Amino acid sequence: SQQGEEDPQALSIQEGENATMNCSYKTSINNLQWYRQNSGRGLVHLILIRSNEREKHSGRLRVTLDTSKKSSSLLITASRAADTASYFCATDAKGFQKLVFGTGTRLLVSP
Amino acid sequence: DGGITQSPKYLFRKEGQNVTLSCEQNLNHDAMYWYRQDPGQGLRLIYYSQIVNDFQKGDIAEGYSVSREKKESFPLTVTSAQKNPTAFYLCASRGLADGGGDTQYFGPGTRLTVL
């Protein structure tokens, strides 16, 4: 069963704008990860945030984690057309040995 | 050049036939995973293996089988018992990320179409 639910399902913005995606999950986690998938390709790991962290940055990416609300957000600043892809959150739940992926957000960045 | 390879990229199968999808990694990772992705959907776990000669069912194992005879290889067989096998299949292995937690490294995928 899929634990993560992402919002919105699809997002369309212009180059230079910021894109925010949200992820909610159900159980206690060790960490939460974000992945990117270009159409018809495999997933690429973007960033990992541990359960004891609240915010993390990597380049133009900013991830927040609120364990009390069981939610996370991914912010992509100054978006580019090349950021067009699907973005998935994945939770590494305590007591499990596998990641559970959300349903994904499809991001379209127009030039 | 380390990574995960999957072959073939595209595969066509007639109904009633078994097919085997290849997944090989040279990252020296112990754990490997198979996922199925349907159009516009997220990933669903089929099987995973934490160590050689051992594997566990995921959420949608019915109609699939795997083997893990070597650390580098984790082939997936889609059997004729799988009622709706047309999908995109992704293989992954697990290693340590820069944050210290485990992350997964994905192959390029195999798109299976049943004719």
Image (cartoon, coloured by chain):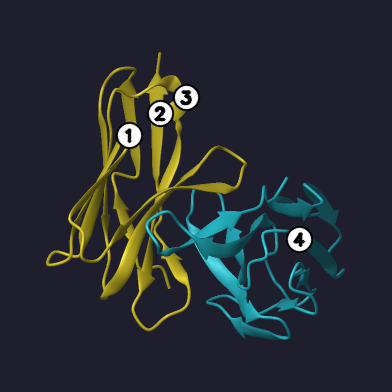
Chain colours: A yellow, B cyan
Q: Chain of mark 1?
A: A
Residue B112 in sight from this viewpoint:
no
Disc 2 and disc 1 in contact, CB within 8 angstroms: yes
Disc 2 and disc 3 in contact, CB within 8 angstroms: no
Number of the front mark, 1 or 3? 3
Near mark 1 (Cα within 10 A), the count class, few <14, some 14-19 or many ≥20, is some
- Which residue is at the front of the view, B109 or B37? B109
CA separation in Å, label 2 and label 3:
9 Å
Q: Residue at x 84, y 66 (%)?
A: B19
Location of mark 4 (residue): B24
Near mark 3 (Cα within 10 A), the count class, few <14, some 14-19 or many ≥20, is few
Q: Does residue A27 appear to the left or right of A111 in the view shown? A: left
CA separation in Å, label 3 and label 4:
29 Å
Q: Amino acid at mark 1?
A: Leu
Say which element carries label 2: strand
CA separation in Å, label 2 and label 1:
6 Å
Residue extending farthest to the top is A111
Q: Amino acid at mark 3?
A: Ala
Residue A57 in the image: x percent, y percent? 27, 42
Say which element carries label 1: strand
Please tell me the numbered disc located at residue A11: 1
CA separation in Å, label 1 and label 3:
14 Å
Number of the front mark, 1 or 4? 4
Q: Amino acid at mark 4?
A: Glu
Q: Does residue A98 appear to the left or right of B108 in the view shown? A: left
- Whether discs 2 and 3 lie on one chain: the answer is yes
CA separation in Å, label 1 and label 4:
35 Å
Number of the front mark, 3 or 4? 4
Location of mark 3 (residue): A82
Label total for image: 4
Number of the front mark, 2 or 3? 3
